[in-house]
Image: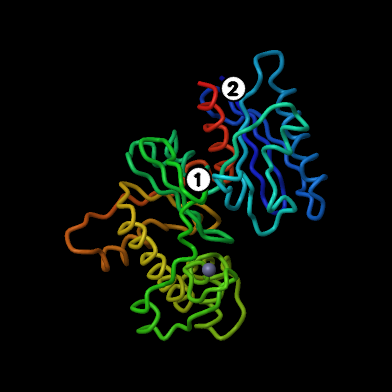
Amino acid sequence: MICGGIDIGGTKIEARLFSHDLATMDVRRVPTPRDSLNDFIDILAEQVRWLDARSEPGPVLPVGIALPGLIDSQTGHAFTSNLPASGHNIQTLLAERIGRKLPLMNDCQAFALSEANGGAGDEFETVVGLILGTGVGAGLAFNGNLTRRANGSALEVGHIGVPARTLVPRQIPVWPCGCGKQGCFEKYVSGNGLAALGQFRLSRPIVAEKIVASASEGDECSAAVLSEWAEIAAELLLTIQLDHDPDCIVIGGGLSRIPDLVPLLEKPFEAIRLGKMRMPAIRVARHGDSSGARGAAVMAQRAVQ
Ligand SMILES: [Zn+2]
Protein backbone atom coordinates (compact mmCIF):
# COMPACT_ATOMS: atom_id res chain seq x y z
CA MET A 1 0.00 0.00 0.00
CA ILE A 2 1.33 3.45 -0.77
CA CYS A 3 1.83 5.66 2.26
CA GLY A 4 3.13 9.02 3.37
CA GLY A 5 5.64 10.28 5.89
CA ILE A 6 6.16 13.80 7.21
CA ASP A 7 9.46 14.82 8.78
CA ILE A 8 9.26 17.98 10.88
CA GLY A 9 12.57 19.79 11.23
CA GLY A 10 13.60 23.13 12.66
CA THR A 11 13.83 24.74 9.21
CA LYS A 12 11.57 22.65 6.96
CA ILE A 13 8.62 20.28 7.04
CA GLU A 14 9.09 17.55 4.45
CA ALA A 15 6.28 15.37 3.11
CA ARG A 16 7.19 12.23 1.16
CA LEU A 17 4.93 9.91 -0.73
CA PHE A 18 6.17 6.31 -0.74
CA SER A 19 5.35 3.33 -2.93
CA HIS A 20 4.25 0.02 -1.35
CA ASP A 21 7.93 -0.99 -1.10
CA LEU A 22 8.87 2.37 0.48
CA ALA A 23 10.57 3.97 -2.51
CA THR A 24 10.11 7.76 -2.64
CA MET A 25 7.54 8.75 -5.29
CA ASP A 26 7.30 12.46 -4.56
CA VAL A 27 8.58 15.07 -2.08
CA ARG A 28 7.33 18.47 -0.96
CA ARG A 29 9.24 20.71 1.43
CA VAL A 30 7.92 23.86 3.07
CA PRO A 31 9.54 26.19 5.63
CA THR A 32 8.70 25.46 9.28
CA PRO A 33 6.69 28.32 10.83
CA ARG A 34 8.82 29.69 13.65
CA ASP A 35 6.42 31.63 15.86
CA SER A 36 2.78 30.65 15.47
CA LEU A 37 1.26 27.37 16.65
CA ASN A 38 -1.75 28.02 14.43
CA ASP A 39 0.44 28.50 11.34
CA PHE A 40 2.43 25.40 12.26
CA ILE A 41 -0.67 23.19 12.42
CA ASP A 42 -2.03 24.79 9.22
CA ILE A 43 1.18 23.97 7.32
CA LEU A 44 1.19 20.44 8.70
CA ALA A 45 -2.43 19.97 7.58
CA GLU A 46 -1.51 21.36 4.15
CA GLN A 47 1.25 18.75 3.83
CA VAL A 48 -1.17 15.95 4.75
CA ARG A 49 -3.69 17.21 2.19
CA TRP A 50 -0.96 17.34 -0.47
CA LEU A 51 -0.10 13.70 0.27
CA ASP A 52 -3.79 12.73 0.25
CA ALA A 53 -4.30 14.41 -3.11
CA ARG A 54 -1.29 12.59 -4.62
CA SER A 55 -2.74 9.24 -3.63
CA GLU A 56 -6.27 9.71 -4.94
CA PRO A 57 -8.33 7.89 -6.06
CA GLY A 58 -7.84 5.17 -3.49
CA PRO A 59 -8.28 4.36 0.18
CA VAL A 60 -7.34 6.90 2.86
CA LEU A 61 -3.57 7.26 2.80
CA PRO A 62 -1.66 6.05 5.88
CA VAL A 63 0.50 9.01 6.96
CA GLY A 64 2.91 9.14 9.87
CA ILE A 65 4.76 12.10 11.35
CA ALA A 66 8.25 12.34 12.86
CA LEU A 67 9.54 15.27 14.89
CA PRO A 68 12.66 16.10 16.90
CA GLY A 69 11.75 15.86 20.55
CA LEU A 70 9.90 13.93 23.18
CA ILE A 71 6.26 12.92 22.79
CA ASP A 72 4.88 12.27 26.26
CA SER A 73 3.32 8.83 26.14
CA GLN A 74 0.69 9.74 28.76
CA THR A 75 -0.42 13.21 27.68
CA GLY A 76 0.51 13.14 23.99
CA HIS A 77 2.21 16.51 24.38
CA ALA A 78 5.30 17.12 22.26
CA PHE A 79 8.34 18.77 23.80
CA THR A 80 10.87 20.10 21.36
CA SER A 81 13.35 22.92 21.54
CA ASN A 82 12.73 24.87 18.35
CA LEU A 83 9.12 24.38 17.24
CA PRO A 84 6.11 26.58 18.10
CA ALA A 85 4.17 23.37 18.88
CA SER A 86 6.24 22.51 21.94
CA GLY A 87 4.04 21.69 24.94
CA HIS A 88 0.98 20.98 22.77
CA ASN A 89 -0.80 17.86 21.58
CA ILE A 90 0.02 17.97 17.87
CA GLN A 91 -2.00 14.84 17.06
CA THR A 92 -5.21 16.29 18.50
CA LEU A 93 -4.76 19.77 17.00
CA LEU A 94 -4.01 18.29 13.58
CA ALA A 95 -6.98 15.90 13.79
CA GLU A 96 -9.26 18.92 14.30
CA ARG A 97 -8.05 20.23 10.90
CA ILE A 98 -7.94 17.05 8.82
CA GLY A 99 -10.51 14.79 10.47
CA ARG A 100 -8.22 11.90 11.37
CA LYS A 101 -5.54 11.18 13.94
CA LEU A 102 -2.09 10.42 12.56
CA PRO A 103 0.66 8.47 14.34
CA LEU A 104 3.43 10.68 15.68
CA MET A 105 6.94 9.64 16.67
CA ASN A 106 10.38 10.90 17.59
CA ASP A 107 12.66 11.37 14.57
CA CYS A 108 15.51 9.25 15.99
CA GLN A 109 13.02 6.45 16.54
CA ALA A 110 11.82 6.96 12.96
CA PHE A 111 15.41 6.72 11.75
CA ALA A 112 15.95 3.43 13.62
CA LEU A 113 12.65 2.01 12.34
CA SER A 114 13.52 2.99 8.77
CA GLU A 115 17.01 1.49 8.84
CA ALA A 116 15.76 -1.70 10.55
CA ASN A 117 13.23 -2.20 7.73
CA GLY A 118 14.85 -2.27 4.32
CA GLY A 119 17.80 -0.22 5.52
CA ALA A 120 21.37 -0.85 6.62
CA GLY A 121 20.19 -2.77 9.71
CA ASP A 122 17.65 -4.89 7.88
CA GLU A 123 19.31 -8.28 8.47
CA PHE A 124 19.87 -7.71 12.22
CA GLU A 125 17.63 -8.41 15.21
CA THR A 126 18.50 -5.54 17.59
CA VAL A 127 19.32 -2.32 15.77
CA VAL A 128 20.31 1.03 17.23
CA GLY A 129 20.05 3.97 14.84
CA LEU A 130 22.50 6.65 15.98
CA ILE A 131 22.26 10.14 14.51
CA LEU A 132 25.47 12.17 14.58
CA GLY A 133 24.49 15.55 13.18
CA THR A 134 23.60 18.94 14.61
CA GLY A 135 22.50 16.95 17.63
CA VAL A 136 23.14 13.42 18.80
CA GLY A 137 20.33 10.96 19.47
CA ALA A 138 19.39 7.37 18.83
CA GLY A 139 16.49 4.98 18.43
CA LEU A 140 16.17 1.28 19.10
CA ALA A 141 14.39 -1.34 17.00
CA PHE A 142 13.94 -5.00 17.87
CA ASN A 143 12.91 -7.43 15.14
CA GLY A 144 12.03 -4.43 13.00
CA ASN A 145 9.71 -2.93 15.62
CA LEU A 146 10.00 -0.13 18.12
CA THR A 147 9.37 -0.74 21.79
CA ARG A 148 7.24 1.56 23.94
CA ARG A 149 9.24 3.87 26.16
CA ALA A 150 7.99 5.26 29.47
CA ASN A 151 8.71 8.91 28.67
CA GLY A 152 8.08 8.70 24.92
CA SER A 153 11.73 9.51 24.34
CA ALA A 154 14.26 8.06 21.95
CA LEU A 155 17.61 6.93 23.35
CA GLU A 156 18.86 10.28 24.63
CA VAL A 157 22.47 9.18 24.34
CA GLY A 158 23.66 12.67 23.38
CA HIS A 159 23.14 13.74 26.97
CA ILE A 160 25.03 10.92 28.62
CA GLY A 161 28.31 12.25 30.05
CA VAL A 162 31.58 11.39 28.34
CA PRO A 163 33.58 9.21 30.79
CA ALA A 164 36.39 10.86 32.76
CA ARG A 165 38.72 8.15 31.41
CA THR A 166 38.20 9.65 27.95
CA LEU A 167 38.55 13.36 28.73
CA VAL A 168 41.15 13.43 31.53
CA PRO A 169 44.13 11.70 29.82
CA ARG A 170 43.60 13.86 26.73
CA GLN A 171 43.24 17.00 28.86
CA ILE A 172 40.02 17.87 27.05
CA PRO A 173 37.82 20.34 29.02
CA VAL A 174 34.39 19.44 30.35
CA TRP A 175 32.19 21.63 28.15
CA PRO A 176 28.73 22.81 29.30
CA CYS A 177 25.76 21.54 27.31
CA GLY A 178 22.50 23.28 26.36
CA CYS A 179 20.62 20.69 28.44
CA GLY A 180 22.03 22.25 31.62
CA LYS A 181 24.50 19.49 32.35
CA GLN A 182 28.20 19.29 31.57
CA GLY A 183 30.39 17.04 29.47
CA CYS A 184 27.57 15.50 27.39
CA PHE A 185 28.59 13.38 24.39
CA GLU A 186 26.73 15.79 22.11
CA LYS A 187 29.25 18.54 22.91
CA TYR A 188 32.09 16.39 21.50
CA VAL A 189 30.69 14.06 18.85
CA SER A 190 28.07 16.20 17.04
CA GLY A 191 29.06 18.35 14.07
CA ASN A 192 29.57 21.30 16.41
CA GLY A 193 31.44 18.99 18.78
CA LEU A 194 33.91 18.06 16.06
CA ALA A 195 34.34 21.77 15.30
CA ALA A 196 34.88 22.53 19.01
CA LEU A 197 37.52 19.81 19.25
CA GLY A 198 39.17 21.26 16.16
CA GLN A 199 39.20 24.75 17.63
CA PHE A 200 40.58 23.39 20.91
CA ARG A 201 43.42 21.52 19.23
CA LEU A 202 44.20 23.92 16.36
CA SER A 203 43.64 27.16 18.35
CA ARG A 204 41.55 28.71 15.60
CA PRO A 205 37.86 28.59 14.59
CA ILE A 206 37.16 25.78 12.14
CA VAL A 207 34.01 24.01 10.92
CA ALA A 208 33.51 20.24 10.91
CA GLU A 209 33.38 20.03 7.10
CA LYS A 210 36.80 21.70 6.84
CA ILE A 211 38.35 19.28 9.34
CA VAL A 212 36.99 16.30 7.40
CA ALA A 213 38.07 17.72 4.04
CA SER A 214 41.58 18.64 5.24
CA ALA A 215 42.03 15.21 6.85
CA SER A 216 41.06 13.59 3.53
CA GLU A 217 43.65 15.75 1.74
CA GLY A 218 46.38 14.49 4.08
CA ASP A 219 46.60 17.32 6.61
CA GLU A 220 48.04 15.61 9.70
CA CYS A 221 46.66 18.08 12.28
CA SER A 222 43.12 17.71 10.95
CA ALA A 223 43.53 13.92 10.76
CA ALA A 224 44.59 13.92 14.43
CA VAL A 225 41.47 15.91 15.40
CA LEU A 226 39.28 13.51 13.43
CA SER A 227 40.95 10.51 15.11
CA GLU A 228 40.34 12.03 18.53
CA TRP A 229 36.71 12.67 17.58
CA ALA A 230 36.44 9.01 16.55
CA GLU A 231 37.94 7.89 19.89
CA ILE A 232 35.25 9.82 21.78
CA ALA A 233 32.54 8.59 19.39
CA ALA A 234 33.78 5.02 20.01
CA GLU A 235 33.16 5.58 23.74
CA LEU A 236 29.58 6.46 22.81
CA LEU A 237 29.31 3.25 20.77
CA LEU A 238 30.64 1.30 23.76
CA THR A 239 28.11 3.00 26.06
CA ILE A 240 25.33 2.01 23.65
CA GLN A 241 26.65 -1.55 23.57
CA LEU A 242 26.87 -1.81 27.36
CA ASP A 243 23.29 -0.52 27.66
CA HIS A 244 21.57 -2.32 24.79
CA ASP A 245 24.00 -4.89 23.31
CA PRO A 246 22.67 -4.41 19.77
CA ASP A 247 23.68 -6.57 16.79
CA CYS A 248 24.08 -3.48 14.69
CA ILE A 249 24.53 0.27 15.12
CA VAL A 250 23.52 2.28 12.05
CA ILE A 251 25.04 5.76 11.87
CA GLY A 252 23.07 8.60 10.28
CA GLY A 253 23.13 12.40 10.28
CA GLY A 254 25.59 14.74 8.59
CA LEU A 255 28.70 13.13 10.07
CA SER A 256 27.74 9.75 8.58
CA ARG A 257 29.16 11.20 5.34
CA ILE A 258 32.72 11.23 6.73
CA PRO A 259 34.78 9.12 4.29
CA ASP A 260 35.67 5.64 5.62
CA LEU A 261 33.65 6.32 8.77
CA VAL A 262 33.18 2.65 9.69
CA PRO A 263 36.90 1.73 9.99
CA LEU A 264 37.55 5.12 11.61
CA LEU A 265 35.14 4.14 14.43
CA GLU A 266 35.86 0.42 14.55
CA LYS A 267 39.56 0.83 15.32
CA PRO A 268 39.18 2.80 18.61
CA PHE A 269 36.07 0.76 19.51
CA GLU A 270 38.09 -2.44 19.21
CA ALA A 271 40.70 -0.94 21.57
CA ILE A 272 38.19 -0.22 24.38
CA ARG A 273 35.90 -3.24 23.89
CA LEU A 274 34.88 -4.91 27.14
CA GLY A 275 36.22 -8.41 27.75
CA LYS A 276 34.83 -10.96 25.37
CA MET A 277 31.92 -8.89 24.06
CA ARG A 278 31.92 -9.02 20.29
CA MET A 279 31.62 -5.72 18.44
CA PRO A 280 28.24 -4.94 16.92
CA ALA A 281 28.19 -4.40 13.18
CA ILE A 282 28.72 -0.70 12.42
CA ARG A 283 26.91 0.48 9.30
CA VAL A 284 26.25 3.78 7.56
CA ALA A 285 22.58 4.60 6.97
CA ARG A 286 21.10 3.53 3.65
CA HIS A 287 18.25 6.02 3.41
CA GLY A 288 20.02 9.25 4.35
CA ASP A 289 17.91 12.35 4.59
CA SER A 290 14.63 10.52 3.92
CA SER A 291 14.90 8.45 7.11
CA GLY A 292 12.56 10.53 9.29
CA ALA A 293 9.73 10.52 6.76
CA ARG A 294 10.39 6.90 5.77
CA GLY A 295 10.28 5.66 9.38
CA ALA A 296 7.07 7.59 10.01
CA ALA A 297 5.60 6.01 6.88
CA VAL A 298 6.54 2.51 8.10
CA MET A 299 4.73 3.23 11.35
CA ALA A 300 1.66 4.53 9.49
CA GLN A 301 1.56 1.44 7.25
CA ARG A 302 1.63 -0.81 10.30
CA ALA A 303 -1.07 1.15 12.09
CA VAL A 304 -3.60 0.16 9.40
CA GLN A 305 -2.49 -3.46 8.94
ZN1 LIG B 1 23.42 17.63 27.44
- Secondary structure beneath dot 1 equals helix
What kind of colouring is applied to the model shown? rainbow
Q: Residue furthest top?
A: 57
Residue at the image position 69 percent from the left and 58 percent from the top: 82
Q: Residue furthest front?
A: 74
The correct choice, above or below, for 282 with respect to 224 in the image is above
Q: Which mark is residue 27?
A: none
Q: Quadrant of the N terminus?
A: top right
Q: Which mark is residue 109?
A: 1
* Callout 2 amino acid: Ile
Q: Which mark is residue 2?
A: 2
Q: Compute the Cα span from label 2 to label 1.
A: 21 Å
Residue 199 at x, y percent in the picture: 56, 80
Q: Is mark 1 within 8 Å of ligand 1?
A: no
Residue 187 at x, y percent in the picture: 52, 71
Q: Are marks 2 and 1 in contact (CB under 8 Å)?
A: no
- Secondary structure beneath dot 2 equals loop
